[in-house]
């Protein structure tokens, strides 16, 4: 029994030794595995830190660009407001000029009507002038023989007057 006990103890020691060896081997394998994982994690960490630096620079640049765009937008909005005001002023000017054109058109129409009326009146006056010239011509034609008769009678009166003056002396 003692032999058996020893045998069992030996087997037990051997199993224990194998378990310890297996556990040590497993620990070494796990340690190697975790060392590899740790190395990969550190590499990833380094890579992430460099990417973080790049991303921070990109973020800073984006923020600067964002600020620049915000200022540009504000400037453009200001320019837009000025342009709207200019457009309104120009629209008012256009409306005033249209009103002035309309008034001038009315004035031109009135003057054209007055010119038309004056031309019509001139035509009537020309006709009247023509008629009066003709009548004057007729009167002159009628007066010419009477003038000649008057001149003849004046000459006769003068002769008679001279003759009478001679006879009185």
Image (cartoon, helix red, strand yellow):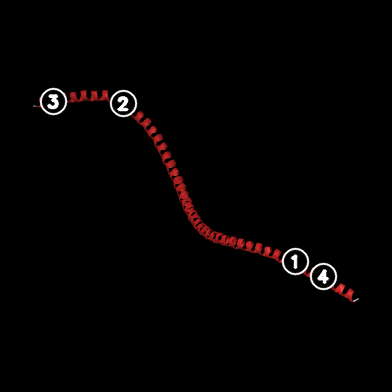
Apparent side of residue 118 relative to residue 61 in the rendered image (left or right): left
Mark 4 secondary-structure assignment: helix
Judging by the rendered image, the residue that carries numbered circle 1 is 25
What residue lies at 26% left-to-right and 24% top-to-bottom? Answer: 144
Q: Nearer the viewer, residue 110 or 141?
A: 110
Judging by the rendered image, the residue that carries numbered circle 4 is 14
What residue lies at 23% left-to-right and 23% top-to-bottom? Answer: 148
Few, some or many residues within 10 Å of mark 2 (<14, 14–19, 20+): few
Report the residue that reaches farthest toward the front. 3
Which is more N-terminal, label 4 or label 1?
A: 4
Few, some or many residues within 10 Å of mark 1 (<14, 14–19, 20+): few
Judging by the rendered image, the residue that carries numbered circle 2 is 137
Judged by depth in the image, the label closer to the viewer, 2 or 3, is 2
- Compared with 41, 161 (above or below) is above
Judged by depth in the image, the label closer to the viewer, 2 or 4, is 4
Report the residue that reaches farthest toward the right. 1
Apparent side of residue 90 relative to residue 153 in the rendered image (left or right): right
Which is more N-terminal, label 1 or label 3?
A: 1
- Compared with 125, 50 (above or below) is below
Which is more N-terminal, label 3 or label 4?
A: 4
Which is more N-terminal, label 2 or label 1?
A: 1
Q: Position of residue 16 (x, y in %)?
A: 81, 71
Mark 3 secondary-structure assignment: helix
Residue 68: give its label: none
Judged by depth in the image, the label closer to the viewer, 1 or 2, is 1
Residue at mark 3 to residue at mark 1: CA–CA distance: 187 Å
Please report contact status of discs 4 and 3: CB closer than 8 Å, yes or no.
no
Q: Nearer the viewer, residue 142 or 43?
A: 43
- Compared with 39, 131 (above or below) is above
For the C terminus, the image quarter is top left
């Amino acid at each position: 029994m003692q032999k058996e006990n020893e045998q069992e103890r030996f087997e037990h020691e051997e199993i224990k030794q194998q378990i310890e060896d297996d556990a040590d081997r497993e620990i070494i394998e796990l340690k190697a595995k975790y060392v590899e994982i740790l190395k990969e994690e550190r590499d990833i960490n380094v890579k992430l830190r460099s990417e973080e630096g790049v991303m921070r620079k990109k973020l800073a640049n984006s923020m600067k660009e964002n600020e620049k765009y915000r200022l540009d937008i504000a400037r453009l909005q200001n320019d837009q407001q000025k342009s709207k005001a200019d457009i309104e002023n120009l629209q008012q000017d256009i409306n005033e000029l249209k009103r002035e054109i309309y008034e001038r058109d009315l004035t031109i129409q009135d003057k054209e009507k007055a010119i038309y009326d004056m031309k019509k009146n001139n035509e009537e006056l020309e006709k009247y002038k023509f008629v009066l010239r003709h009548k004057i011509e007729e009167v002159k034609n009628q007066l010419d023989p009477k003038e000649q008769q008057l001149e003849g009678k004046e000459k006769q009166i003068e002769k008679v007057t001279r003759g009478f003056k001679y006879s009185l002396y």
